[in-house]
Image (tube, rainbow, N blue to C red):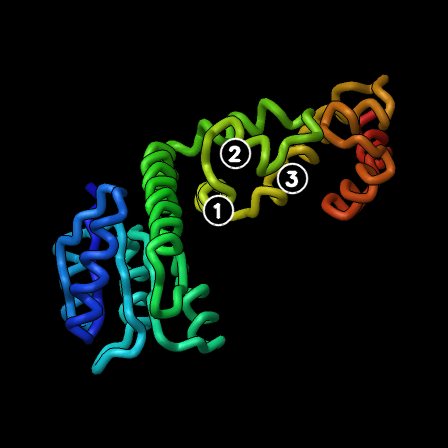
Amino acid sequence: MIRTMIVDDEENIRYGLKRQVESLNLDIQVIALVDNGEVALEAVQKYHPELLFMDINMPGMNGLEVIKKIRELQHMCSIIIISGYDDFQFAKEAIRQKVDFYLLKPVDDDELAEVCAQAIDNYQKRLLEHNLLKQYQPNDSADLLAYIQNHLDDPTLDYDSLQNSFGLSRSSISKLIKQATNQSLNEYITNQRIDLADAYLKNQKNAAIKQIALMCGFTDPLYFSRVYKKIRGRTPNSTREENL
């Protein structure tokens, strides 16, 4: 069952929406009906809902303020705003707070069913990503870094290839790399490739610059030389000559 909360200061809307969502044949179970923002925040921390319906205009703490605090607490629940306000600023702030859907009252059954199904799917994807990320905490990011080291010669090494290999999102990969190296993914890959180029330039005396560029994942030798000079302050040939 999908644990669901409904937050609205109007009693008839709370109970009407409860009947509506529980009739959708989506295994939704409403576990709490709440009439204000302060109680809603407490209930979220107590019941850990997977799906949350939120009104915006409520006395005291409004819906957007509650959502902001929920996200700050890193709750992964899917959030659907159902509001009578067709206001761009409200919608803009809702997007910024990672609300899944913003619906205008009244909502018919077909639209509600479609949105609920997608919101449930969004929650399940976030949960899966969270569980995967727990397997790759900063101390365990050695697997990710080792993969990069072993594929520096692959010009397609990027976020997409890492996502395909590790099943992590772009943001998760970025976070792990940043925590482990204090660099962005692109910075880390580029710096590691230039370090590898140094080793080849010093030890592969007969290898052409073009060949070294390819062995370091650069398909364009001229671009390789520009990047190398930008990072090292000298050309690849200068490094080679210094080590003859």
Quick check: 173 left or right of 13? right
Secondary structure under the numbered disc 3 in the rendered image: helix
Label 1 and label 3: CA atoms lie apart by 21 Å
Residue identifier under label 2: 163
Tell me where residue 158 appears, x and y as whole percent. 62, 36
**In the foreground, 153 or 209:** 153
Which comes sooner in the sequence, label 1 or label 2?
A: 2
- The disc at residue 82 is none
Which comes sooner in the sequence, label 3 or label 2?
A: 2
Residue identifier under label 3: 191
Residue identifier under label 1: 171
Q: Amino acid at mark 3?
A: Asn
Q: Residue at x 48, y 46 (%)?
A: 171
Callout 3 crowding tier (Cα within 10 Å): few <14, some 14–19, many ≥20: some
Q: Amino acid at mark 1?
A: Ser
Q: Quadrant of residue 150?
A: top right
Q: Residue at x 29, y 70 (%)?
A: 55
Q: Amino acid at mark 2?
A: Gln
Q: Is residue 121 above or below residue 55?
A: above
Which comes sooner in the sequence, label 1 or label 3?
A: 1
Q: Is residue 90 above or below residue 214?
A: below
Question: Residue farthest to the bottom?
Answer: 59
Instruction: State the quadrant of the C terminus.
Output: top right
Q: Quadrant of residue 126?
A: top left
Tell me where residue 25 appears, x and y as whole percent. 25, 42
Q: Residue at x 29, y 78 (%)?
A: 57
